[in-house]
Amino acid sequence: MTSRRSTAEIFEKIPTVIFETSSAAAAALAGEVKALVETRQKEGRQVVLGLATGSTPVPFYRELIRLHREEGLSLRNVVTFNLDEYHGLAPTHPESYFRFMREQLFDHVDIPDENIHLPSGLVAVEEIFDHCHAYEEMIDAAGGIDFQILGIGRTGHIGFNEPGSSRDSLTRRITLDRITRQDAAGDFRGEENVPRFAITMGVGTILRARKIVLMAWGEGKAEVVARAVEGVVTEAVSASFLQEHGDARFVIDAPASRELTRIKLPWLTGPVRWSPEETRRAVCWLSSTFKRPVLKLTDEDYNEHGLSDLLSEQGPAYQLNIRIFNQLQHTISGWPGGKPGADDTFRPERAKPYPKRCLIFSPEPQDAVVSIGATIDRLVEQGHEVMVVCMTSGNLRVPDSEADKFASILLEIGETFAEGWGQQAEYARMTLQSLTDKGAVGEDPASLRQLKSLILRGEVRDAAQALGLSHERLRFLDLPFYEKGRYRRFVLGSEDERLVTGLLREFMPHQIYLTGSASDPSSVAALCAKLVEQGLASLQGETWVDACSVWLYRGREKALEPWQIAMAMPISPMQLERKARALARCQSLTSMEQEVTRVNQMTAEQYDGLGLANYEAIESFQRRVVGS
Ligand code: F6R
């Protein structure tokens, strides 16, 4: 029997299930694994699971642990094979996948130790070939993998099969791609500390699994997900080989689905309910794809490019164009805090009250300055009461070289002035010693983390000053979840909630600026956004909360597209220079973050292309819809 394929499926060459949130997806998947494990238990058989590491599977592992603890799921009949391991890392290394798996899953469930398999990170180079061959044989001897869990890297890798990996590749050592190493830089405190090699199952090894599920969360994965699911099968995106597997599936959250045709260009895959947002998206797409300003789009343009029903519902083109043009036009405002005394009917922010109390949340200290430095600048200049809240210390991002620099200067001062500087010199010596003791990849002791926090505070104060923001307008929360954790495995606690809610209650803002809503849910930004959202929810009913406007900005994720933007803050060439100068004061920014001014320029170019005013650069914001 052949069933009729939906239009979305014609674009999507791998079945793809979209869940609203990663936790809902992870729960469904863990439920599926539970059912498989229990069925096999009844049959007296084992289940062979292929496992992944990284941020992606963490919610899935947490759910398995919960099922084990609370619902009596036993995993005694489970055999596991992990996809990969960094070559050169001992199992005890905090970033080794061996340790990751122990901490995230194995130590909390009852999988027998002898059933657990990972490639070794310490195998000698001359033994790699045999080691990898033996790994393949062990998988076969266990009966092959029943259920393979995967994540996907920004290079499209599955396991560590970087671009160029062939369809038939087997377990082997691979050189990690530059992008992969950049993505892991936070975990290792600097790209230079990320291992260059990994041992990974091959694409061919993975494709031998009977069932495969690839998970992806957050907007950062949206592009590569679309390439893997809808693009051609190519060695350039190893996940695209899953198109050739009979039982492979993508399970993703809503932000990771945003580049799929059915989400991005829904009118190409079926009937659309033309909400104001969907209409704006379609008109902006038509204009930017065919490089014609909105006001010049014709009936034919709509009809010939899949938008005939929009035209018949809301046309003629002339009227539709004007309506959307006006909506876009009204997003532009150089008064992010509202323009006092002005008619605000069509302005993004209300005029009253003036001045406003503006609370700007920065997940890591430098995030807000990097992403919306010009808006902060403008709010201060326009007389608002601005408070930038650096939610975490961000110390894991500060390279050892910065701590070394600081301690060396302090030591020199101590030795030069000797008298009365004994303690400082001693502190400097101790710091330098702890840097040597832990080595490039060891864990920072608490005292070193503290010094790195202070260094970052200094950078941010310096950058903020360049934007006219005095030190008193910066608040450092140092949320405990960050101090206790490591990237990709932070866990929020009640003290974090208490601190954020307390701050909201104390400040009672008229405006909040927030980022992280579209990020990978395990990222610092997403966790911080969750704390603010929870805090607001718990204070619901207080009059100030109901009146407070919440503006969402993008940090490290993809910039907002014009159809998504509710407030576009234009930046003059001089202001952009000022922002760039402020950024230059943050030594711990990655080169990508330093390029944010280019991102601001690109948004301005997009507005220009739509036929709106031609600004030098734009910082953009989405309105948070209450209850979203
Ligand atoms: C790790 C692995 C990789 C990751 C991928 C995504 O075992 O197989 O393919 O799944 O690099 O990493 P995260 O989940 O950290 O974004």
Image (tube, helix red, strand yellow):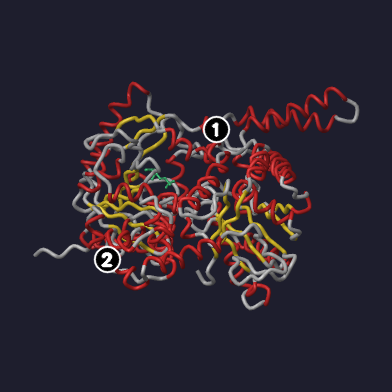
Residue at image position (28%, 69%) is: 271
Counting every numbered tag in the picture gives: 2
Q: Distance between the residues labelled 1 and 2?
A: 52 Å
Residue holding disc 1: 441
Picture coordinates of residue 129, whole percent (x, y)? 29, 26
Figure quadrant of residue 43: bottom left
407 lies above or below 53: above
The residue at the point 32 percent across, 56 percent down is: 261
Quick one: quadrant of the N terminus? bottom left
Judged from this view, the residue extending furthest toward the left is 1
In the rendered image, which residue does mark 2 sit on? 270
Q: Is residue 567 left or right of residue 89?
A: right
Q: Residues within 10 Å of mark 1 (few under 14, many from 20)?
A: some
- Specify the farthest residue to the right: 419
Quarter of the view holding residue 626? bottom right
- At 83% from the left and 33% from the top, the residue drawn is 423
Query: Along the polypeptide, which appears first: circle 1 or circle 2?
Result: 2
Q: Which of 171 and 144 is in front in this view?
A: 171
Label 1–label 2 contact, CB within 8 A: no
Residue 495 image-quadrant placement: bottom right
Residue in the picture at 31% in, 71% down: 312
Residue 541, percent from left and from top: 63, 78
Image coords of residue 455 (percent x, y): 70, 39
| Secondary structure under the numbered disc 1 in the rendered image | loop
Looking at the picture, does residue 239 appear above or below residue 334? above
